[in-house]
């Protein structure tokens, strides 16, 4: 049975690691993580990718959360008989249900970081949201946050230092939690190994 994984670029390294370690015979196709700046484009680009892949694969597995699409991914998945990894977004997948719900209950104003976002903060957030051109909107965008939680996949001193810089830029306290792949691997395995 031929399988294609269609993944968010923000999870590319993690998914490739899982695929390589588990020696899955799958093909991986990525969509840009920067589509999160325009959630409606996630829907249209995923539809286009699934349409192109459907004739060539027996099974399509999508590694995306809802990611701000307000449920609009589900009809696309149904249209192409594609399965999607459980979870509203990668923060919950990486944190795991229990930790994510605890943080959401105790500190709902938490800004989450992942390894990808730490590495790409300037491109995805500063330039992506226009903060480089309009620094005055930083307070409007981040003024209601109360903390930064870095869901660290791989312990790395450079990434930890960069996360501290991001938290300082946002003027928020930082907590680092080593989560590894959280529940992403087990949720993906449920679909690929079924």
Image (spheres, grey):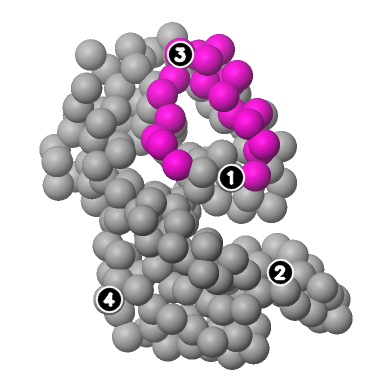
Which residue carries the number 2 mark?
Answer: 127
Q: Is residue 83 magenta?
A: yes
Residue interval drawn in magenta:
68-87
Query: Are the residues at dot 1 and dot 3 in contact (C-beta closer than 8 Å)?
Result: no
Residue 13 in view (yes/no): no
Q: Residue at x 30, y 39 (%)?
A: 187
> How far across and how far down the image is residue 156, in percent?
30, 79
Q: Residue at x 52, y 15 (%)?
A: 78
Sooner in the amino-acid sequence: mark 1 or mark 2: 1
Give the Cα distance between marks 1 and 2.
20 Å
Q: Residue at x 14, y 47 (%)?
A: 21
Query: Are the residues at dot 4 and dot 1 in contact (C-beta closer than 8 Å)?
Result: no
> How far across and how far down the image is residue 121, in percent?
57, 71
Q: Is residue 158 above or below residue 65?
A: below
Which residue carries the number 1 mark?
Answer: 67
Residues packed near mark 3 inside 10 Å, few (<14), some (14 to 19) or many (20 plus): some
Query: Are the residues at dot 3 and dot 2 in contact (C-beta closer than 8 Å)?
Result: no
Residue 110 in view (yes/no): yes
Q: Nearer the viewer, residue 19 or 144?
A: 144
> Which disc is residue 17 wearing?
none
What secondary structure is found at the residue carrying circle 4? loop
Residues packed near mark 2 inside 10 Å, few (<14), some (14 to 19) or many (20 plus): few
Which residue carries the number 3 mark?
Answer: 81
Position of residue 48 in the picture relative to residue 25 (left or right): right
Give the Cα distance between marks 4 and 2.
26 Å
> How far across and how far down the image is residue 109, in percent?
62, 70
What secondary structure is found at the residue carrying circle 2? helix
> Which disc is residue 155 wearing?
4
Q: Is residue 129 above or below residue 91?
A: below
Q: Nearer the viewer, residue 28 or 191?
A: 191
Sooner in the amino-acid sequence: mark 4 or mark 1: 1
Query: Are the residues at dot 4 and dot 2 in contact (C-beta closer than 8 Å)?
Result: no
């Amino acid at each position: 049975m031929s399988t294609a994984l269609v993944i968010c670029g923000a999870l590319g390294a993690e998914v490739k690691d899982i695929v390589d370690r588990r020696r899955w015979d799958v093909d991986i196709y990525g969509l840009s993580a920067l589509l999160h700046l325009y959630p409606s484009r996630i829907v249209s680009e995923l539809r286009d990718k699934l349409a192109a892949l459907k004739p060539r694969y027996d099974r399509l597995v999508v590694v995306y959360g809802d990611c701000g699409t307000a449920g609009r991914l589900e009809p696309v998945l149904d249209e192409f008989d594609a399965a999607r990894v459980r979870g509203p977004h990668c923060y919950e997948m990486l944190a795991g249900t229990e930790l994510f719900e605890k943080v959401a209950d105790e500190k709902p104003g938490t800004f989450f970081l992942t390894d990808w976002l730490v590495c790409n903060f300037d491109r995805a957030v500063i330039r992506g949201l226009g903060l480089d051109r309009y620094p005055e909107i930083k307070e409007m965008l981040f003024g209601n946050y109360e903390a930064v939680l870095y869901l660290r996949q791989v312990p790395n001193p450079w990434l930890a230092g960069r996360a501290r810089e991001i938290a300082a830029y946002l003027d928020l306290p930082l907590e680092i939690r080593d989560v590894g792949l959280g529940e992403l691997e087990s949720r993906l395995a449920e679909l690929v190994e079924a």
